[in-house]
Image (spheres, grey):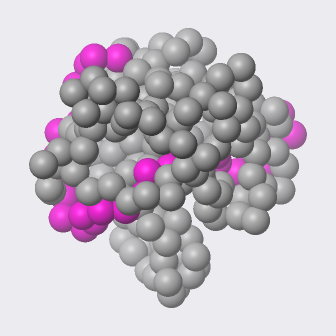
Amino acid sequence: MISCNQDRGWVDLFNGTDLEGWEVMGATESNFFVEDGILVAETKMELPNTFLATTNSYANFELEVDFKVNRGMNTGVQIRSGVYEEPTTTPYLNGSLEEGTRDWKAGTVNGYQIEIDPSDRAWSGGFYEEGGRGWLVPLNENDEARKAFNQEDWNHFRIIADGNHFQTWINGVKAVETTDDKASTGFIALQLHSIKNEDQLGLRVRWKNIRIHELD
């Protein structure tokens, strides 16, 4: 059961016990589980990009989440997300900031993603569109935000979506402030990215203190 903690209208999305209020998207199986009160996702061979999504949709809100991630992973927090009903082609800006296009199958999860990036690039808190246009706001010019990420330790995201205005913070440091008009509502989700190499097997991302305050 999703619980309200009475702190200025904040609602806990994760109850610390099980995955009630969440559902798997992007695959018929997943590798999300609860361990010692922490929500965990662990990489697994032959598992496609998988998302643990809220069963409710959210439009305008402030979202907070703590996370800890192993180096070598690629993951993120989805907001205002959905699923394509038919094959779709979009423009795409990749991690090397090269422009192109991408084709997406029907059923692909798409939406805004706040990146969790434990690589040396350290773009955690950057603004990406999963299953869509790719990088909307990379952090290549925000050294302060890049340095704020704690490798192999707990980190804190603060995320605000208010109309077409988006803001993100990583450990209290502003990462992104931008506007975009594509999506006005959708589910929130946690991503477990697919892997291709055995040396990526068994890597984990952990989440806790996932809470939301819906805005008027």
> Where does residue 153 sit, x and y in percent of width and height?
56, 12
Q: Residue at x 22, y 51 (%)?
A: 60
Question: Is 97 placed left or right of 31 in the picture?
Answer: left
Q: In this view, does 72 lie to the left or right of 142?
A: right
Residue positioned most to the bottom: 86
- Along the line of sight, which residue is nearer the eye, 95 or 90? 90
**For the image shown, how many numbered marks are present on the structure?**
0
Give residue 168's position: percent from left, percent from top: 27, 34
Please identify the quarter of the rendering in which residue 148 is found: top left
Residue 170, picture quadrant: top left
Q: Which residue is drawn at 26% across and 19% down?
A: 173
Q: Residue at x 71, y 32 (%)?
A: 34
| Whether residue 39 is situated above or below residue 130 in the rendered picture | above
Region rendered in magenta: 171-199
User: Is residue 90 found left or right of 8 in the rendered image?
Assistant: right
Q: Can residue 8 be seen in this view?
A: yes
Q: Position of residue 118 (x, y in %)?
A: 55, 27
Residue found at x 84% / y 49%: 45
Residue 34 higher or lower than 128, as above or below? above
Q: Does the magenta stretch include residue 97?
A: no
Q: Judge whether residue 173 is colored magenta.
A: yes
Quarter in which the N terminus is drawn: top right
